[in-house]
Amino acid sequence: MSEDWAAVAKAINQRVNELGLQQKELAKRSHVSLAIVREVQHHLVERRRSPRTLESLSTALGWHPQHLDAVLHDRTPPAVDDPVVDLADTLWSRIDRVEERLEDITERLDALKSDMASVVNQLAEVAKHVRGRR
């Protein structure tokens, strides 16, 4: 599943212009830090964001809470009065959680690999020392 952060930035910029909002006002209304608003609005850093961040921005812009998430995943945004779908139970959320878990497992495996290399090096040093005593 691809994510289109450029589309999110474009949607936010269009809406901010329609409403005549400044970044500071959007940050204040959404309770999202100014730095994150700037990053998302100008597509400066592409990274996974909390669904609550997109929800807060959507709501502050007068949209359905899941509007920006729909834009991000190239779906038709829901109407403002549509019911909120529990994203925790959606397939995409499950996939996101699996991806996050896999990243965590990868980081742990990398750390174990590094630890094992260190242990192997230490054992090699001990073996050299033992051989030298013979």
Image (cartoon, rainbow, N blue to C red):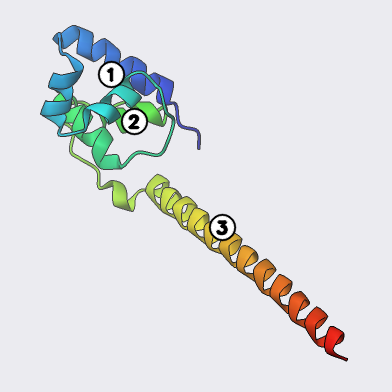
Q: Name which residue type carries label 1.
A: Ile
| Side (left or right) of 9 relative to 79 | right
In the figure, residue 19 lies in which quadrant? top left
The residue sitting at the bottom extreme is 134
Residue plotted at (31% across, 20% down): 41
Residue beneath disc 2: 70
Q: Name which residue type carries label 2.
A: Ala
| Disc number lying in front (3 or 2) | 3
Q: CA distance from mark 1 to mark 3?
A: 34 Å
Q: CA distance from mark 2 to mark 1?
A: 13 Å
Residue plotted at (35% across, 23% down): 8
Residue 108 in percent (x, y) is at 53, 63
Q: Name which residue type carries label 3.
A: Thr
Q: Earlier in the sequence, mark 3 or mark 2?
A: 2
Quarter holding the C terminus is bottom right
| Disc number lying in front (2 or 1) | 1
The residue sitting at the right extreme is 134
Secondary structure beneath disc 3?
A: helix
Secondary structure beneath disc 2?
A: helix
Residue 55 in percent (x, y) is at 23, 35
Residue plotted at (28% across, 18% down): 12
| Side (left or right) of 64 relative to 128 | left
The label on residue 106 is: 3
Residue plotted at (22% across, 27% down): 34
Q: Residues within 10 Å of mark 2 (few under 14, many from 20)?
A: some
Front residue of this view, candidates 132 and 50: 132
Q: Earlier in the sequence, mark 1 or mark 3?
A: 1
